[in-house]
Amino acid sequence: MKKIRKALIPAAGFGTRFLPQTKAMPKEMMPLVDKPIIQRVVEELVDVGIETIVIVTGWNKRSIEDHFDNNFELEEKLARAGKEKELEIVRKISSLAEFVYLRQKGPLGNATPILNAKHIMGDDPFMVFWGDDFVDAAPSRARQLLAAYEKYDAAILGALRARTENDYKKYGFVGGEEVEKGVFKISKILEKPGSSENSPSDLAVVSGIIVTPGIYEPLEMAKSGLGSGQELVYTHGIQGMVDKNLPVYAVEIRNAKYRDTGNKLDYLKAVVEYGLDHPEIGKDFAEYLKTLKN
């Protein structure tokens, strides 16, 4: 079994739900108080031993590269001002991992970045986390996925139970046999079934997966068969792996709170909750929020 040392973050979307804010600023760089969403995602990956992070971007995402790069002028200014704490924070960001940047090429869809990164990932398994959503969990979602991979040596999908009927229009859903509590061997995955009636279960695949090289061939086949206006989604590859009898498992993430920060309301909720937990401003922020009840 190969160790997982690489991760992919697709980050080429336009973030149209946040226009006009995202006209010039990537949605992945929206702040959670004082930290961009994508940095929160990167730190979770690094915490479980990821060393190389491939970020697939678009023409308007240069600020992501700048954020994780060295900024000599800023570091010099902070050093001269004696701001050691801030200097340490800035230096740590650029040393989190080895960052590789690719421009997305190919059809629309969340699977295109997987094919774009094939020459870098090679025959290695890797994590795929999105840059505008995440899961708060204990242990972390990345650690839970990695534990399942190390046990089953297979592709692993992170999953949560559907919360509303509308979820069936937003996510992929899986069906299969429960092989141990919260772990399912997948026999079917259906992208956006539309309703609970049409879904193989109430288990939605959200926010993070581990894929193995077996996904490339099914994705290439799906890509060649796309019709006009169709998107290439990773569930095409997962179902193709299942059809080829390659093992795929879904893990229901324990102690989880899903943060769809690409959604305005969920983003604002996350900012408020992270603000309340912030060591510097949390207490004062809580007092301020109490005044809004009047």
Image (tube, rainbow, N blue to C red):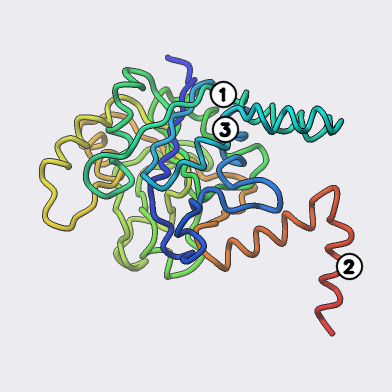
Residue behind mark 2:
287
**What amino acid does circle 3 point to?**
Phe
| Residue 241 tag number | none
Q: Nearer the viewer, residue 78 or 251?
A: 78
Q: SS for tag 3?
A: helix
**What amino acid does circle 1 point to?**
Ala
Q: In the rendered image, which quarter is residue 191 located in?
A: bottom left
Q: Residues within 10 Å of mark 3 (few under 14, many from 20)?
A: some
Q: Are marks 1 and 3 in contact (CB under 8 Å)?
A: no
In three-dimensional space, the C-alpha distance between marks 1 and 3, rounded to whole angstroms, equals 9 Å
User: Where 258 sits versus 141, above or below?
Assistant: below
**Dot placed on the residue nearer the N-terminal end, 1 or 3:** 3
Q: Are marks 2 and 1 in contact (CB under 8 Å)?
A: no
Q: Nearer the viewer, mark 1 or mark 3?
A: 3
Q: SS for tag 1?
A: loop
In three-dimensional space, the C-alpha distance between marks 2 and 1, rounded to whole angstroms, equals 38 Å
| Residue 68 tag number | 3
Which residue is located at x 53 percent, y 41 percent?
181
Residue behind mark 1:
97
**Dot placed on the residue nearer the N-terminal end, 2 or 1:** 1
Q: SS for tag 2?
A: helix
Q: Residue furthest bottom?
A: 294
Which residue is located at x 36 percent, y 49 percent?
174
Q: Are marks 3 and 2 in contact (CB under 8 Å)?
A: no
Quadrant that contains the N terminus = top left
Residue 169 at what x, y percent from top left? 36, 65
Residue 224 at what x, y percent from top left? 11, 41
User: Where 132 sits versus 285, above or below?
Assistant: above
